[in-house]
């Protein structure tokens, strides 16, 4: 990533730092039995040690998931360097995916599990974290880009930045 991609590097670092700081605060201040109600009947914070991936699939496969995360981060970085995407939407998508993958990879490598803490109480849904939100939005933006701006693999929709 060259210097003209500074804003994307800043976004990636901002998300990683925010993710890690909040996870540290949660792990340092909540036990697995604590729950902080943020918005009654809608949102709570709890401390969950997730040894798997999304929806706790591949539980106790932390090393494998850590390796996959690192390989994914390398692949995104190499793609960005080689292809030099021009689309702002594609850059946003890749930045969010990379930031989320790095955030969860740090947990897997340093802690042996991913810290999840955001619980939706109005609907039954797995507990998640900021990195997961970043990955989700990155995936949605990538799907929008692929469906509407990159027809047949050509450069439709790419800007000149």
Image (tube, rainbow, N blue to C red):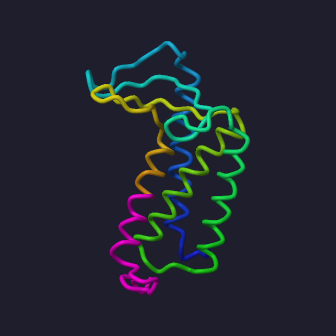
- Quarter of the rendering containing residue 20: top right
Image-based side of 142 in relation to 50, left or right: left
Image-based side of 8 in relation to 79, left or right: left
Residue 153 pos. (x, y %): 46, 83
Q: Residue at x 54, y 15 (%)?
A: 31
Segment tinted magenta in the rendering: 139-161
Q: Residue furthest top?
A: 33
Image-based side of 85 in relation to 44, left or right: right
> Up-down: is 75 above or below 157?
above
Residue 26 pos. (x, y %): 52, 26
Q: Which residue is drawn at 61% across and 76% down?
A: 2
Residue 84 pos. (x, y %): 56, 80
Which of 143/25 is in front?
143
Quarter holding the N terminus is: bottom right
Residue 142 pos. (x, y %): 43, 65
Which of 145/110 is in front?
145
């Amino acid at each position: 990533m060259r210097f003209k991609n500074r804003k994307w590097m800043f976004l990636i670092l901002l998300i990683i730092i925010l993710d890690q700081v909040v996870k540290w605060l949660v792990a340092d201040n909540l036990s697995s039995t604590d729950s902080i109600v943020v918005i009654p009947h809608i949102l709570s914070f709890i401390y969950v040690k997730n040894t798997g991936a999304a929806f706790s699939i591949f539980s106790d496969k932390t090393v494998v998931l850590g390796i996959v995360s690192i390989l994914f981060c390398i692949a995104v970085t190499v793609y960005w360097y080689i292809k030099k995407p021009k689309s702002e939407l594609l850059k946003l998508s890749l930045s969010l995916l990379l930031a989320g993958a790095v955030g969860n990879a740090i947990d897997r490598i340093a802690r042996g599990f991913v810290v999840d803490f955001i619980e939706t109480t109005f609907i039954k849904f797995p507990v998640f974290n900021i990195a997961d939100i970043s990955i989700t939005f990155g995936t949605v933006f990538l799907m929008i880009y692929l469906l509407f701006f990159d027809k047949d693999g050509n450069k439709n929709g790419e800007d000149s930045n």
